[in-house]
Amino acid sequence: MKAKHMQTKDIKNFKMSDDVYKLRRKVIEHIYELRHLRLPRVQVRIGEARHSRALLGQASLKDRKVWITKAAINMGERVLRNVVFHELVHAIYGFNHDEKCPLMQAKLETILSKENCIEHFTRYHKKFN
C-alpha cells in the first residue's frame, strides 16, 4: 500500500534537498525549545504559499502536521518562532484562532519574545493535558 504524501492545497511542498533540510532544521529547533513539555512527534514540511504571500504556515488540526513557508523562515528567528508555536497549537491541540491571544491571532500582528511564546504555548498545553 502506497503511503499518502503529506500535502495541503495552500502550500506547495519543496522536494527534500540539503538546502530544504537546513530550512526544516530551523523549524525543528524551535519545536525543541518546547521539549520540556514532552510534545508528541509532529511532521514538518517546508514549502511556498500557492495563493497568498501572507500565508506563513498551516497545520492540520489535531493531526500533528505542520507546513511552514520559506517566507516565514526568512523573516527571522522571532517571527519564525511565533509562526511555529502558533501552528503547533493547531496541530497538537486542535485549538482554533483566538484574537484575544497574541500567539493565536489569525494574523501575525504582535511578535512575541521567546519567553512570551513559551508562556502562551504552555497555557494551551496545560489546558489540553
Image (cartoon, rainbow, N blue to C red):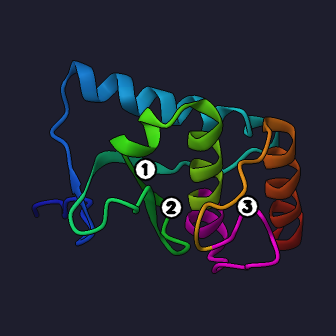
Q: Earlier in the sequence, mark 2 or mark 3?
A: 2
Q: CA distance from mark 1 to mark 2?
A: 6 Å
Decide if residue 68 is on the left or right side of residue 129.
left
Q: Of discs 2 and 3, which sits in the foreground?
A: 3
Which residue is painted at 59% across and 74% down in the image? 106
SS class, disc 3: loop
Point out residue 14 in the picture as x, y percentages from the top left corner. 19, 43
Identify the residue at horizontal 51%, vertical 61% (top origin). 64
Residue behind mark 3: 103
Which one is in front, 57 or 39?
57
The residue where tag 1 is placed is 43
Q: Nearer the viewer, mark 3 or mark 1?
A: 3
Q: Is residue 85 above or below residue 87?
A: above
Residue name at image x 71 percent, y 48 percent: 111
On residue 64, the disc is 2
User: CA gap, disc 2 to disc 3?
Assistant: 18 Å
* Residues tagged 1 and 2 counted as in contact (Cβ below 8 A): yes
